[in-house]
Image (cartoon, grey):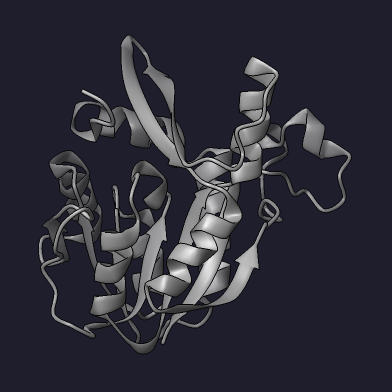
Amino acid sequence: MVNDYDSFGEAYVAANEHGLINGYYTRPAIMDLAGDVAGRRILEAGCGAGPISAMLRDRGATVAGFDSSAKMVELARKRLGPDADLRIADLGGPLPYPDGAFDDVIAALVLHYLEDWTGPLAELRRVLRPGGRLIVAVDHPFAVDFLHFQKTGESAYFGVRSHDEEWTFGDHTAPMTFWTRPLHVMTDAFTAAGFRINVISEPPIAPDTPRELIPDFLEDRPEKAFLCFLFFVLEAR
């Protein structure tokens, strides 16, 4: 089964939680964009094992989260406690929250699993209060197209297309499918769903990244930035 986190959730967390991409790039970037969250009601869409929710809660936010994987919700509950508001739900359908329930929604590395963003963005807008924020991280389309060009000698940047990967954890191989789209298709989808784009960010790795985790190609770059994910802060109109 493709994208079956139930089958490899524990192995994924063990392999990735404290690595460069999750621990010293994605999570610090999301927290920097979120800023002061004390007293804010925040929903994490695709919460996984809950590390971002835990960080938000530690900074004073009231957090809720959902994931389509029962295993990942189980792992998040172990982290956040039995009383945490965690649910099994699919962003491809209606979400189990009332209108305007949240000040912020975090969707980190979630939307790029979906071919069609129309319904999911409408639902995320629905559960946000007017003026609330949707903070998004997705695969950077330039990076995806660069890898495609390396493999095929052709660019496919301007299409909405899927690409497949295989993730390996020990003896387990997990087939994965992702969807990429050009930047203007992303921004059109955000504005059509009722969002104003406040920030587009291509952040560096965190200043406290251990030296042994920094790839050689970043070592001589003062800015320590590279094409990997693209981050947005969107405001609900």
Name the residue at 44% across, 64% down.
189
What percent of the width, then of the height, locates residue 228? 62, 43
| Along the line of sight, the residue nearer the viewer: 206 or 29 | 29
Is residue 151 depicted above or below 36 in this figure?
A: above
Name the residue at 29% across, 53% down.
46
**Residue at the top extreme of this rendering:** 171
* Residue 211 location, quadrant: top right
* Residue 237 location, quadrant: bottom left
**Residue at the front extreme of this rendering:** 159
Name the residue at 67% across, 23% down.
154
Res 28 seen here: no
| Along the line of sight, the residue nearer the viewer: 168 or 11 | 168
What number of labels is visible? 0
What percent of the width, then of the height, locates residue 89? 14, 55
* Residue 178 location, quadrant: top left
What percent of the width, then of the height, locates residue 153? 70, 18
Q: Is residue 79 left or right of residue 219?
A: left
Q: Quadrant of the N terminus?
A: top left
Name the residue at 37% across, 81% down.
60
Res 236 seen here: yes
| Along the line of sight, the residue nearer the viewer: 90 or 55 | 90
Q: Is residue 235 left or right of residue 81?
A: right
| Along the line of sight, the residue nearer the viewer: 125 or 26 | 125
What percent of the width, then of the height, locates residue 92? 21, 53
Is residue 179 depicted above or below 172 in this figure?
A: below
Is residue 156 depicted above or below 170 in this figure?
A: below
